[in-house]
Image: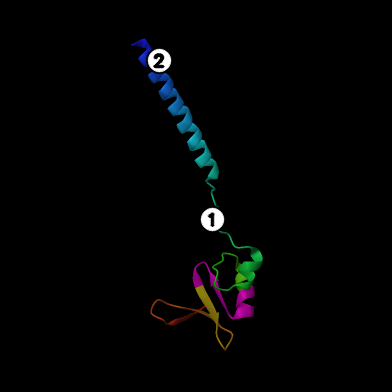
Amino acid sequence: MTKILLILFFVLLFLLFFYSRRNKRSAQKTKIIPNYVPFLKELEFNPDISTDNWDIHKLRLEKFRRSQYKGLTFFVSSENRIYYLSKEGDKVYC
């Protein structure tokens, strides 16, 4: 009876060791990718990426005549006035 318990103990110990090694290998393969943050140059040359930087926003308005600032797209009219479109589609001048 004690031999059976001893064998059972070693089998359980072996399975526990094997299982823990398997989990360590799978944990090493997992990579955490940080949130995508566009580079400063990419923000400067792409007016469709929203920015919180006022200076980049002003540069993009001058260059592309449109820019996203804090999630809202601003445009420059033919009279060089800055506006955005409301939910109803109306131009709201700043």
In terms of image quadrants, where is residue 62? bottom right
User: Which structural element holds mark 1?
Assistant: loop
Residue 40 coordinates in the image, percent (x, y): 65, 64
The answer to whether residue 31 is seen in the rendering is yes
Q: Looking at the image, which residue sits at the far left? A: 1
**Magenta segment boundaries in residue numbering:** 59-72
Q: Residue at x 33, y 11 (%)?
A: 1
For the image, the number of numbered tags is 2
Instruction: Give the residue pinned by disc 1.
Output: 35
| Residue 62 counted in the magenta span | yes
| Residue 74 counted in the magenta span | no
Callout in the foreground (2, 1): 2
| Amino acid residing under circle 1 | Asn
41 in relation to 1, above or below? below
| Amino acid residing under circle 2 | Leu
Residue 4 coordinates in the image, percent (x, y): 36, 15
Q: Is residue 77 left or right of residue 6?
A: right
Q: Residue at x 38, y 12 (%)?
A: 3
Q: Of marks 2 and 1, which one's residue comes earlier in the chain?
A: 2
Residue 92 coordinates in the image, percent (x, y): 47, 80
Instruction: Give the residue pinned by disc 2.
Output: 6
The answer to whether residue 55 is seen in the rendering is no
Residue placed most toward the observer, 79 or 42: 42
Q: Residue at x 43, y 20 (%)?
A: 10
Residue placed most toward the observer, 7 or 89: 7
Within-10-Å neighbours for mark 2: few <14, some 14–19, many 20+: few
Residue placed most toward the observer, 5 or 71: 5
